[in-house]
Image (cartoon, rainbow, N blue to C red):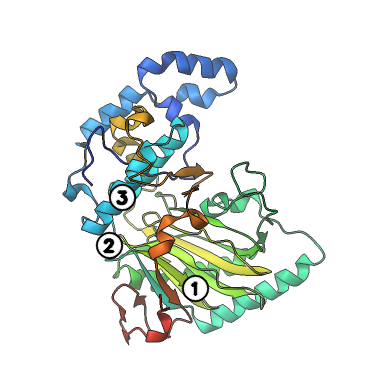
Amino acid sequence: MTMTAKSINVITLSLPFVLVWVAVAFAPKSSELFRNNHLQQNPQDSLFQRRMQESDRRDEYNRRNYSWPLDADNFVPNTPGWKTLMERRMQQVQCIEDLGHRYNGWLSVMTSAQTVPNFTEHGFALTRAPPMLLEELQQSLRDGLLQNEQSSMMETEDGNEIIVAAIEDENDSTTKTTELLPPLWIPQEDLNAKVLEELHPIHTDFVNGIDLIGAKAYGLRVYRNQSMLLMHSDKPDTHIVGSILHIDHSEDSKDWPIVVEDFKGNTHEIVMEAGDMLLYESAKVYHGRPRAFDGSWYCSIFSHYYPADWDVENEHWESHYAVPPCWFDSAADYADDDVVPKLEVVGTGIREPNNKDGWEALETSLKWKGPVPSGGIYDLPTGRSKGGLLKELLKVPS
């Protein structure tokens, strides 16, 4: 699809550093009445008063030579499948009526489509965790579950990363009317530091030797029955290259696939076994678990890194400057339910509420199942790794 000022298509996703007031704060000067009304109703909102005007943002947009609509070469990477996927998402985002959600959607899609570079061909791969490290993590999990029988160790504000914020919450009026249990949080600061250090070489190999700096490893996070993780991407200041290490799950757990999009425009569902690791470009590729988890518990740990030459302080602003001026146009000018499914922003995640399990691409996804073979980093789209061909048993028949 070719996007013009009147056929544009946008994505709906939100980033952790973006708040609802951003859209209003960046509104054109013609929205001054709206701005004044907001301040009258929210006099405490001093942040709102300090934010950049849309005219200033557009000056930066022009100074950086951004243009609209995007040419094929403006998509990063510039593969046909990625371009098609991002254009579709852009159309969806521009159809969002709420300005705050729409602006957040633009921030997310421009981060994925253009401002953050890619470091691998497909955006993700699979490997196995070091056996001794996995044993330590599983012991920490067992100890934590035992302690939890006497005391509640719920997710704290300190661990409120994007994945937590993308989990559907029973307090969110837009979620399904089902009783959801928040994830348990098992603190292990020293072990997390060890995880970040020991997994560093694996992440470096994944991105072909690029020098990486460890940002954070957080966990253990223990999801519980009926948990859902909305599709999202991570923050572009420090969460550039990451991994999800599946530690273990309860015996009554049914398969709970991680869903990830690749740079060719494909959607994959991957069922991980204990010790499997998903390596991914987490600020760029959309990922989540939109299908509801069926089981008692499911535990993972998350690690994130960024390139040594990364501009940690300012990188996230680039997505603001890249948002095209048409983001403020009327959603009615772009709405076309016959072309793309409706997209909603929920917290820091997105979903397609009119589709089964909240994501249309699950109907045609490529499905894989662990355990991942030892001895290499496996590129699922090509079926190859440094150790040879990926074992056929990983591919789930359609």
Q: How many marks?
A: 3
The residue located at (65%, 59%) in the rendering is 183
Front one among 5 and 240: 5
Number of other residues with Cα within 10 Å of mark 2, as a class: few under 14, some 14 to 19, many 20 or more: some
Give the left or right position of residue 17, taking residue 136 as reference.
left
Specify whether residue 287 is in view.
yes
Image quadrant in which the C terminus is located: bottom left
Q: Residue 255: horizontal and vertical position, in percent?
A: 55, 73
Give the left or right position of residue 101, taking residue 209 as reference.
right
Q: Residue 364: horizontal and vertical position, in percent?
A: 38, 64
Disc nearer the start of the sequence (3/2)? 3
Label 3: which residue?
86
Element at label 3: helix
Disc nearer the start of the sequence (2/1)? 2
Verify CB contact (< 8 Å) between mark 2 and mark 1: no
Element at label 1: strand
Using the rendered view, name the quadrant where residue 316 is placed. top left
Q: Residue 189: horizontal and vertical position, in percent?
A: 61, 63
- Residue type for callout 2: Lys
Using the rendered view, name the quadrant where residue 149 is placed. bottom right
Residue 383 versus residue 235 in the image, above or below: below
Label 2: which residue?
264
Element at label 2: loop
- Residue type for callout 1: Val
Q: Residue 201: horizontal and vertical position, in percent?
A: 39, 73
Specify whether residue 199 is in view.
no
Label 1: which residue?
271
As measured in the structure, the alpha-carbon distance from the residue carrying label 3 to the one carrying label 1 is 25 Å
